[in-house]
Amino acid sequence: MSSAPDSGWFGHPKGLSTLFFTEMWERMSYYGMRAMLVLFMTASLQQEGLGFTVASAAAIYGLYTGAVYFLGLPGGWLADRLFGGQKAVWYGGIIIMCGHIILAVPHEYSFFIGLIFVATGTGLLKPNISAMVGQLYSDADERRDGGYAIYYMGINMGSLIGYYVCGYFMENVGWHWAFGAAAVGMAIGLVQYKITLNNLPEHSALPANPLSAKGTSRTWGAIALFVAVVAGVTIAAMTGAIIINPSVVAGYTAVAFTIIFFVYFGLIYFKGKLTGEEKQRMWALFLVCVASACFWSGFEQAGSSLNLFARDYTDRLIGKFEIPTTWFQSLNSIFIIVLSPFFAALWINLSKKMISPTYSVKCAFGLIIMASGFLVMFMAAHYAAEGLKVAPYWLVTTYFLHTVGELCLSPVALSAVSKLSPRRYTGQMMGVFVLTYSIGNIIAGLLAGNFDPNNVQEIPTLYLQIALFSIGVGIVLVLMSFKAKIWEKQGLET
């Protein structure tokens, strides 16, 4: 596999610019829309919202964000076996854009249809555009890590644009104009992608392991069946033929995903003919997965309970300017851009000093640091319970701690999957690991459902419970790592 000439785009293949801007605009549409979901669902009918309870809105939010990650599994499979990466990204982007356009239609039913479209399109686009970044480089190309760092910068730039643009439209023009702005963002990304498609290598257009003619026919049949089932359930729900309780559905979905995780992980551990060393690494990886699920269940409060806290209990006035609620979520992207180089240097310097804790210990520290952000919110919520509007710096501090926790856990966890998984099961273990994102997001929605604006006295308890549980899990993981003496060996140091 050959790389494009170094002179293509800042010393990287020209295809990186295609993927960078496509991902940037897709993330603009995704994060810009996601930041408004709970706010729109809980806004009253007089405010042109949906008037849902916080419990229902948070559960729907959790189901949506969880589905986005879960659908990445079949999305990646379809690209590998049927479409090829280039078409998967193109089709996914079109479906996403259509979803945002549907969301822009001012109707309750269009909201749910739009969410289904966006989740499905994201599941098709997201894993495959990330995979195509790696396909730009040969296995021996030392620019690969730098390419992913640039690509990751595009993700954060896109999220910043989304938060600011959609947040501004939400506050000053209207909900559906903001959803429409997300559609425009995705449209720009698609146009840019199509115009510069020739920058991508030809092999990225082909499925890596194409199906036979019979398999292709069966796959299209399965896709048609999936579409028919989703359409049938949606129509039945809209017409009142079936009554769906979002909280109940979210609870069962979280249980189902957790069972799938344990069953698949267990099959590989017990039936995968692993060596003793491989089993030890799998045990370490299991601890990382637990930390990941717990981390995202807290971190993803950003779009739900912390979003509501910013709207209802935070003094957002600076002079005569009122900070749009969604802008607070942009703090995570800003802190990531600023802090990422420091954390990259931190792990290198610790390694030079022969300080090399296990992956699970690093993830546990990330979980504990994230939990400390909820201790900050516990104190802020006490002031809110007294009827006061709290200063913005409480949320700023919380998002800072959450970002530090993310930088401790997220890249380390991904590295753990690639290095600790048995070689012959690396791809499958990455899919299993992605389930922890889905589980964490759905649990986050269920937890946020306990945020009751009509009972502000209980909000401090909610944040304290999240903090104590996360800290407890982090401490247990550290103790288990030390007890089992799971330290990196044989070239596994990070």
Image (tube, rainbow, N blue to C red):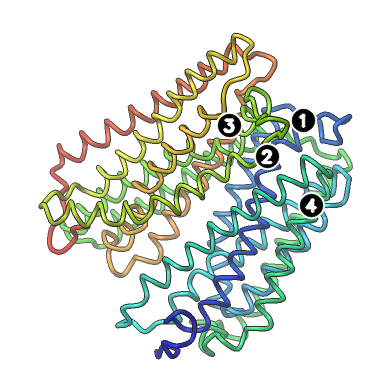
User: Left or right of 65: which side holds 4?
Assistant: left
Q: Secondary structure at mark 3?
A: helix
Earlier along the polypeptide chain: callout 1 or callout 3?
Answer: 1
- The CA span between labels 2 and 1 is 10 Å
Q: Secondary structure at mark 2?
A: helix
From the image, which quarter does the N terminus lie in?
bottom left
The reply to whether the C-beta atoms of the residues labelled 2 and 1 are less than 8 Å apart is yes
- Give the residue number, with chain letter if any, for mark 3: 306
Earlier along the polypeptide chain: callout 3 or callout 4?
Answer: 4
Name the amino acid, label 4: Ile
Residue 50 lies, in percent from the top left, at: 82, 35
- Give the residue number, with chain letter if any, for mark 2: 60
Residue 366 lies, in percent from the top left, at: 34, 41
Viewer-proximal residue, 260 or 396? 396
Earlier along the polypeptide chain: callout 2 or callout 3?
Answer: 2
Q: Quadrant of residue 44?
A: top right
How crowded is the residue under tag 2: few (<14 C-alpha within 10 Å), some, or many (20+)? many
Earlier along the polypeptide chain: callout 4 or callout 1?
Answer: 1
- Give the residue number, with chain letter if any, for mark 4: 113
User: Left or right of 392: which side holds 465?
Assistant: left
Name the amino acid, label 2: Ile
- The CA span between labels 2 and 4 is 13 Å
The reply to whether the C-beta atoms of the residues labelled 4 and 1 are less than 8 Å apart is no
Furthest residue toward front: 319
- The CA span between labels 4 and 1 is 17 Å
Earlier along the polypeptide chain: callout 2 or callout 4?
Answer: 2
- The CA span between labels 2 and 3 is 16 Å
Q: Quadrant of residue 116?
A: bottom right
Image position of 133 with respect to 349: above or below:
below
